Image (tube, rainbow, N blue to C red):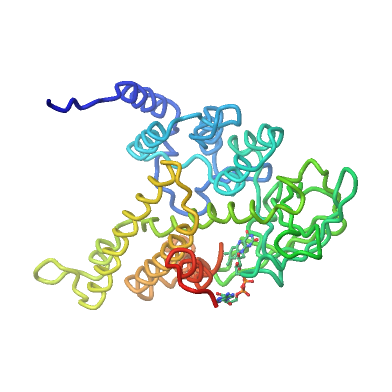
Amino acid sequence: MSAVATHDTSLDAFRADTRAWLEAHCPAEMRQPVRNEADVCWGGKRFRFQSDAQRAWMERMGERGWTVPTWPREYGGGGLTHPQAAILREEMAALKCRPPLQSFGIWMLGPALLKYGSEAQKRHVLPQIARGEIRWCQGYSEPNAGSDLASLATRAEVHDDHFVVTGQKIWTSYADEADWIFCLVRTDNAKKHTGISFVLIDMTSPGVSTKPIKLISGKSPFCETFFDHVKVPRANLVGELNAGWTIAKYLLTHEREMIGAIGERATPKPLGRHAAEKLGRDESGRLSDGVLRAEIARFEVDEAAFRAWMRMASEQARAGEAIGALSSALKYYGAELNKRRWELMVAVGGADALEWEGERSQDGAAVRTWLRTKANSIEGGTSEVQLNVVAKRILGLPGA
Ligand SMILES: Cc1cc2nc3c(=O)[nH]c(=O)nc-3n(C[C@H](O)[C@H](O)[C@H](O)COP(=O)(O)OP(=O)(O)OC[C@H]3O[C@@H](n4cnc5c(N)ncnc54)[C@H](O)[C@@H]3O)c2cc1C
């Protein structure tokens, strides 16, 4: 008996409709590669849109739920199946459409609320994330709680219908631009992991303040965040009281997966081609600098292997399998790969790549990106800590 290949014609129709809709609704200006941070749309009440086209693109995609294509429709998503979402990605790539919106709400809080939020929280918070109306930041780290996150001390006193939060967070990315913060707070001093709760706090509440911290890249993307007797409604507790650690860990797997994906983020041109244009070719057409040639070749092979690995992990996630500790392995390797990528970019560019200001270098885009990548192996959990997770949970090695 011969096998009959099945072909889902409804997906063909979906593809045709999607392409037609994107062609009609994605402004020409939004079909250019993202050149720098200003081209990225984060949404939220304080976001300054670069152009009307950037705003229109976010709003049109948000209305359709396609900023979060697989979230359920009742929570502001597109309600797409995974095959449909893959088609949307392919059609956006074919038309070179920029992502309409990126946010910690989409990458981190959304998945956590879908799993642990109350129905009221999902219906209220998720559509605001999908439409880019509210920007979220993450209040996990504290001056004495980083890798050992469960040592956190920001206190939430429990009252009948509200909490009173007092303490300090640190390294809060974009806290000064965010509207709300998802925060880990201590609600029981006697227990370490089981004395932590997960709460949502409005950044405009009386008693919340932020202070920017400057990085070596010259930018200030993150802040110290202070809470001075901040009143937070009890309804803003996610999950049960003192059960926030489970939610925190689940959210971290999504954060690590998101950061790991930077390993896939290409430079504007493939590295080998960029190097050949910059440094010249030998008589057989190869990059003339033999040492860099070998390093770039090694990098490109590792990068291709990482892409294949990321695809495997996303297939696994799509099939409904939790990726759990694998997110630590992806985060570790993606971060290290991105650091190598930008080391090579700067090595290829020579002194030009170190230019800090000026139109030619787009205000030092290369050198600032290179310096920023140094943080990749710290943010979302350090490389050493990810290796500990891999050793214990994937390789099954005994703990210290
Ligand atoms: C760019 C950037 C953005 C960030 N954004 C946010 C944010 O938005 N919200 C937020 O809450 N936090 C944020 N962070 C903080 C980040 O999560 C922490 O910096 C990180 O978890 C490490 O904590 P730490 O800085 O306190 O370092 P520490 O935990 O003090 O670590 C110091 C050193 O000790 C090593 N170390 C610690 N414990 C172990 C161990 N058990 N085994 C081996 N080595 C160990 C570490 O690897 C590191 O090298 C951000 C950080 C960066 C760099």
Question: Does residue 248 appear anywhere in the picture?
Answer: yes
Outermost residue toward the right in this view: 160
Question: Does residue 357 appear anywhere in the picture?
Answer: no
Q: Position of residue 245 (x, y in %)?
A: 67, 56
Q: Quadrant of the C terminus?
A: bottom right
Asked where in the image residue 273 lies, by quadrant, the reply is bottom left
Compared across the picture, whether 87 is left or right of 187 comes to left
260 in relation to 17, above or below: below
Q: Position of residue 193 (x, y in %)?
A: 70, 62
Residue closer to the observer: 54 or 236: 236
5 in relation to 343, above or below: above
Residue closer to the observer: 228 or 36: 228
Compared across the picture, whether 108 is left or right of 16 comes to right
Residue closer to the observer: 236 or 136: 236
Q: Residue at x 69, y 57 (%)?
A: 139
Q: Residue at x 52, y 27 (%)?
A: 64
Asked where in the image residue 267 lies, by quadrant, the reply is bottom left
Residue closer to the observer: 305 or 57: 305
Q: Position of residue 53 (x, y in %)?
A: 51, 36
Count the labels in the image. 0
Q: Residue at x 76, y 58 (%)?
A: 185
Q: Residue at x 68, y 33 (%)?
A: 119
Q: Quadrant of the N terminus?
A: top left
Q: Position of residue 281 (x, y in %)?
A: 17, 69
Compared across the picture, whether 81 is left or right of 38 comes to left
Ligand 1 rendered quadrant: bottom right
332 in relation to 9, above or below: below
396 in relation to 322, above or below: below
